Image (cartoon, helix red, strand yellow):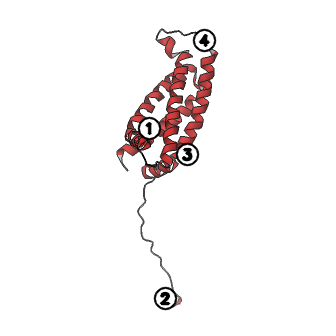
Amino acid sequence: MSKTNRIKLLLDLTTFVAFLIAMDPRSLGIAVHEWLTIALAGTIVVHLLLNWGWIVEVTKRLFAKGKGLNGSRVNYILNWAMFIDGVLIMLSGIMISQAVMPSMGIVLPESFGWRGLHSFSTNLFMLGLGLHVALHWNWIVSTSKRLFVRKVKQTPVVVMSLDRKDVQA
Protein backbone atom coordinates (compact mmCIF):
# COMPACT_ATOMS: atom_id res chain seq x y z
CA MET A 1 0.00 0.00 0.00
CA SER A 2 1.32 3.43 -0.87
CA LYS A 3 2.13 5.85 1.90
CA THR A 4 -0.21 8.40 0.30
CA ASN A 5 -3.18 5.99 0.44
CA ARG A 6 -2.39 5.18 4.06
CA ILE A 7 -2.31 8.91 4.90
CA LYS A 8 -5.52 9.54 2.92
CA LEU A 9 -7.40 6.78 4.71
CA LEU A 10 -6.26 7.75 8.21
CA LEU A 11 -6.94 11.44 7.55
CA ASP A 12 -10.38 10.68 6.11
CA LEU A 13 -11.34 8.37 8.99
CA THR A 14 -10.19 10.92 11.55
CA THR A 15 -12.06 13.72 9.75
CA PHE A 16 -15.21 11.59 9.49
CA VAL A 17 -15.20 10.71 13.20
CA ALA A 18 -14.44 14.32 14.21
CA PHE A 19 -17.28 15.55 11.97
CA LEU A 20 -19.71 13.14 13.61
CA ILE A 21 -18.55 14.30 17.06
CA ALA A 22 -18.90 17.95 16.03
CA MET A 23 -22.48 17.33 14.88
CA ASP A 24 -23.70 17.57 18.50
CA PRO A 25 -22.46 20.90 19.86
CA ARG A 26 -24.54 20.57 23.03
CA SER A 27 -22.58 17.52 24.20
CA LEU A 28 -19.16 19.14 23.70
CA GLY A 29 -20.00 22.73 24.39
CA ILE A 30 -20.14 25.42 21.75
CA ALA A 31 -16.47 26.45 22.06
CA VAL A 32 -15.18 22.90 21.40
CA HIS A 33 -17.67 22.55 18.55
CA GLU A 34 -16.48 25.74 16.87
CA TRP A 35 -12.73 25.12 17.28
CA LEU A 36 -13.09 21.47 16.21
CA THR A 37 -14.91 22.46 13.02
CA ILE A 38 -12.22 25.02 12.20
CA ALA A 39 -9.66 22.21 12.55
CA LEU A 40 -11.89 20.07 10.30
CA ALA A 41 -11.75 22.77 7.63
CA GLY A 42 -7.98 22.34 7.67
CA THR A 43 -8.25 18.58 7.24
CA ILE A 44 -10.60 19.09 4.30
CA VAL A 45 -8.00 21.33 2.64
CA VAL A 46 -5.38 18.58 3.14
CA HIS A 47 -7.86 16.01 1.74
CA LEU A 48 -8.33 18.15 -1.37
CA LEU A 49 -4.58 18.61 -1.81
CA LEU A 50 -3.95 14.86 -1.50
CA ASN A 51 -6.60 14.22 -4.16
CA TRP A 52 -5.63 17.16 -6.38
CA GLY A 53 -4.34 14.91 -9.16
CA TRP A 54 -7.74 13.20 -9.42
CA ILE A 55 -9.52 16.57 -9.39
CA VAL A 56 -7.36 17.93 -12.23
CA GLU A 57 -7.60 14.73 -14.31
CA VAL A 58 -11.39 14.43 -14.02
CA THR A 59 -11.84 18.14 -14.72
CA LYS A 60 -9.79 17.79 -17.93
CA ARG A 61 -11.76 14.73 -19.04
CA LEU A 62 -15.09 16.34 -18.13
CA PHE A 63 -14.49 19.20 -20.54
CA ALA A 64 -12.76 17.16 -23.27
CA LYS A 65 -14.97 16.41 -26.27
CA GLY A 66 -16.09 12.83 -26.71
CA LYS A 67 -14.63 11.57 -23.45
CA GLY A 68 -16.87 9.57 -21.14
CA LEU A 69 -16.47 9.68 -17.39
CA ASN A 70 -18.86 6.95 -16.25
CA GLY A 71 -19.29 7.23 -12.47
CA SER A 72 -16.65 9.92 -12.15
CA ARG A 73 -19.09 12.58 -13.35
CA VAL A 74 -21.54 11.89 -10.49
CA ASN A 75 -18.68 11.80 -8.02
CA TYR A 76 -17.24 15.04 -9.42
CA ILE A 77 -20.56 16.89 -9.20
CA LEU A 78 -21.20 15.55 -5.70
CA ASN A 79 -17.73 16.67 -4.58
CA TRP A 80 -18.31 20.21 -5.90
CA ALA A 81 -21.73 20.32 -4.23
CA MET A 82 -20.16 19.21 -0.94
CA PHE A 83 -17.40 21.81 -1.31
CA ILE A 84 -19.91 24.63 -1.87
CA ASP A 85 -22.05 23.32 0.99
CA GLY A 86 -18.98 23.14 3.22
CA VAL A 87 -18.21 26.80 2.45
CA LEU A 88 -21.81 27.65 3.43
CA ILE A 89 -21.43 25.70 6.67
CA MET A 90 -18.21 27.54 7.55
CA LEU A 91 -19.53 30.97 6.54
CA SER A 92 -22.79 30.58 8.44
CA GLY A 93 -20.89 29.07 11.38
CA ILE A 94 -18.63 32.11 11.54
CA MET A 95 -21.65 34.40 11.35
CA ILE A 96 -23.32 32.70 14.35
CA SER A 97 -20.10 32.08 16.27
CA GLN A 98 -20.39 32.40 20.03
CA ALA A 99 -16.81 31.45 20.89
CA VAL A 100 -14.26 31.76 18.07
CA MET A 101 -15.19 35.19 16.75
CA PRO A 102 -15.72 36.76 20.20
CA SER A 103 -12.32 35.38 21.25
CA MET A 104 -10.87 37.51 18.44
CA GLY A 105 -12.79 40.56 19.60
CA ILE A 106 -15.42 40.29 16.86
CA VAL A 107 -19.04 40.26 17.98
CA LEU A 108 -21.63 39.75 15.28
CA PRO A 109 -25.37 40.44 15.66
CA GLU A 110 -27.54 37.37 16.17
CA SER A 111 -29.42 36.24 13.09
CA PHE A 112 -31.81 33.34 12.83
CA GLY A 113 -31.31 33.38 9.06
CA TRP A 114 -27.64 32.41 9.44
CA ARG A 115 -28.56 29.82 12.08
CA GLY A 116 -31.17 28.28 9.75
CA LEU A 117 -28.69 28.23 6.85
CA HIS A 118 -26.09 26.61 9.11
CA SER A 119 -28.50 23.90 10.22
CA PHE A 120 -29.84 23.23 6.71
CA SER A 121 -26.42 23.14 5.05
CA THR A 122 -25.04 20.85 7.77
CA ASN A 123 -27.91 18.39 7.31
CA LEU A 124 -27.43 18.55 3.53
CA PHE A 125 -23.71 17.91 4.02
CA MET A 126 -24.51 14.77 6.05
CA LEU A 127 -26.53 13.45 3.12
CA GLY A 128 -23.70 14.29 0.71
CA LEU A 129 -21.16 12.69 3.04
CA GLY A 130 -23.20 9.48 3.10
CA LEU A 131 -23.27 9.43 -0.70
CA HIS A 132 -19.55 10.26 -0.85
CA VAL A 133 -18.72 7.34 1.45
CA ALA A 134 -21.00 5.05 -0.58
CA LEU A 135 -19.29 6.01 -3.85
CA HIS A 136 -15.86 5.37 -2.35
CA TRP A 137 -16.83 2.28 -0.32
CA ASN A 138 -14.78 -0.20 -2.37
CA TRP A 139 -11.65 1.97 -2.00
CA ILE A 140 -12.30 2.38 1.75
CA VAL A 141 -12.71 -1.37 2.30
CA SER A 142 -9.77 -2.46 0.15
CA THR A 143 -7.43 0.18 1.59
CA SER A 144 -8.57 -0.61 5.15
CA LYS A 145 -7.89 -4.31 4.59
CA ARG A 146 -4.40 -3.56 3.32
CA LEU A 147 -3.74 -1.23 6.25
CA PHE A 148 -5.31 -3.10 9.16
CA VAL A 149 -5.44 -6.78 8.19
CA ARG A 150 -2.10 -8.52 8.25
CA LYS A 151 -1.73 -11.72 6.28
CA VAL A 152 -0.97 -14.61 8.58
CA LYS A 153 1.56 -17.08 7.26
CA GLN A 154 -0.03 -20.41 6.64
CA THR A 155 1.80 -23.19 8.46
CA PRO A 156 1.37 -26.67 7.11
CA VAL A 157 -0.94 -28.83 9.13
CA VAL A 158 0.37 -32.30 9.89
CA VAL A 159 -2.33 -34.90 10.14
CA MET A 160 -1.44 -38.14 11.77
CA SER A 161 -3.58 -41.19 11.39
CA LEU A 162 -3.44 -44.47 13.12
CA ASP A 163 -4.41 -47.36 10.99
CA ARG A 164 -5.64 -50.49 12.75
CA LYS A 165 -2.70 -52.47 11.50
CA ASP A 166 -0.23 -50.01 13.07
CA VAL A 167 -1.65 -50.63 16.53
CA GLN A 168 -0.44 -53.79 18.23
CA ALA A 169 -2.22 -55.45 21.06
Precedes in sequence: disc 4 or disc 2: 4
Precedes in sequence: disc 4 or disc 1: 1
Q: In this view, does 158 lie above or below 94?
A: below
Q: What residue is shown with label 2?
A: 166
Disc 2 marks a residue whose amino acid type is: Asp
Residue extending farthest front: 65
**Residue at the spot 40% in from the left edge and 42% down from the top edge:** 54
Front tag of 4 and 2: 4
Disc 3 marks a residue whose amino acid type is: Ala
- Secondary structure beneath disc 3? helix
Disc 1 marks a residue whose amino acid type is: Leu
CA separation in Å, label 2 and label 3: 60 Å
- CB under 8 Å between discs 4 and 2: no
Precedes in sequence: disc 3 or disc 1: 1
* Label 3 crowd bin: few (<14), some (14–19), many (20+), radius 10 Å: few
Q: Which is nearer the eye, 68 or 5?
A: 68
Residue 112 in picture, x, y percent from top left: 64, 16
- CB under 8 Å between discs 2 and 1: no
* Label 1 crowd bin: few (<14), some (14–19), many (20+), radius 10 Å: some
Q: Which mark, by number, is residue 38?
A: none
Q: Which mark, by number, is residue 134?
A: 3
Residue 32 seen by the camera: no
Precedes in sequence: disc 2 or disc 1: 1
Q: What residue is shown with label 1?
A: 11
CA separation in Å, label 3 and label 4: 37 Å
Classify residue 157 as left or right of residue 169. left
CA separation in Å, label 4 and label 2: 92 Å
Q: What residue is shown with label 4?
A: 110
Residue 53 seen by the camera: yes
Front tag of 2 and 1: 1
